[in-house]
Amino acid sequence: MRHLHQRIRDEIEARIMSGEWPPGHRVPSEHELMAEYGCSRMTVNKVLSTLAANGLITRRRRAGSVVAEPSTQTAVLDIQDFAQEAARAGTVYRFKILHRTIEPIDAAAAQRTGVPVGTEMLSVITLHLMDEVPEAYEQRLINLATVPEAGEERFTRDPPGTWLLRQVPWTDAEHIVRAVSADSVLAKRLHIQTGAACLVLERRTWQAGAFVTEARITYPGERHHLVGRFSPAAKGPAIGAGAS
């Protein structure tokens, strides 16, 4: 079940992304939102702060908030770090390592990553939770030839993506977005119905041509959204590095 601040945020985002509220449109004030949703000022402030951090609105002291103006037509897909996203939303984040093993990759994985069949990879499955509600199911391969220290890492303090960002800077990335229906295993992990719509983000990174990691992160469709940001300096689609 969604928390109230998540529902308010989702409804405002839907109005912005659909064009119902165009750039420059005045966003209801904190007091108006408090009256509409019957909630506290703290809840409304969390929502508006998150929307501003995601680049969807501009908050102006005394003048209120308006829908932000995109500065270019080049969209930037930003993958939020789970812990940072939780801090902005006022929720409690934790992760659980469900599976960890070293194994040789098969032909399909070799073709995706560009490494030889049989190359040893660390395979890690992680469940990310927000306020104890499953937020995402992550399946990750880490190339031990590029990141040998991962072979001994148990990920007790940071999840694999965050740990990797601190260990190995990447120079190239490939990012794919897919829609899938949850099978029985995925439905059980994410606390959703079998067959429910899910959003899958696949990301592969390299360092100077050497493959680093492949992550397949699956989100419940009804509890996740993508936010497009815009940058005048960007010359083509770019990917945020928050979750590796």
Image (cartoon, grey):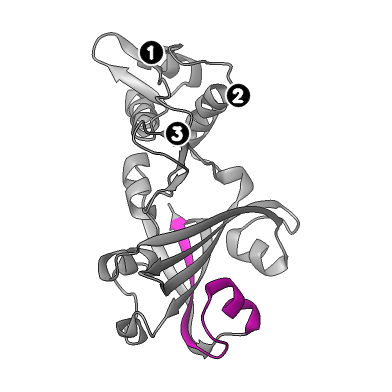
Q: Position of residue 190 (x, y in %)?
A: 59, 59
Which quarter of the figure is the C terminus placed in?
bottom left
Residue beneath disc 1: 29
- Sooner in the amino-acid sequence: mark 3 or mark 2: 3
Residue beneath disc 2: 18
- Sooner in the amino-acid sequence: mark 2 or mark 1: 2
In the image, which residues are magenta?
107-129
The image shows residue 243, relative to residue 234, as above or below, that is: below
Looking at the rendered structure, the kind of residue marked 2 is Ser
* Nearer to the camera, 45 or 160: 160
Residue beneath disc 3: 5
Q: Position of residue 173 (x, y in %)?
A: 45, 60
Looking at the rendered structure, the kind of residue marked 3 is His
Disc 2 secondary structure class:
loop
Q: Position of residue 42 (x, y in %)?
A: 32, 28
Disc 3 secondary structure class:
helix
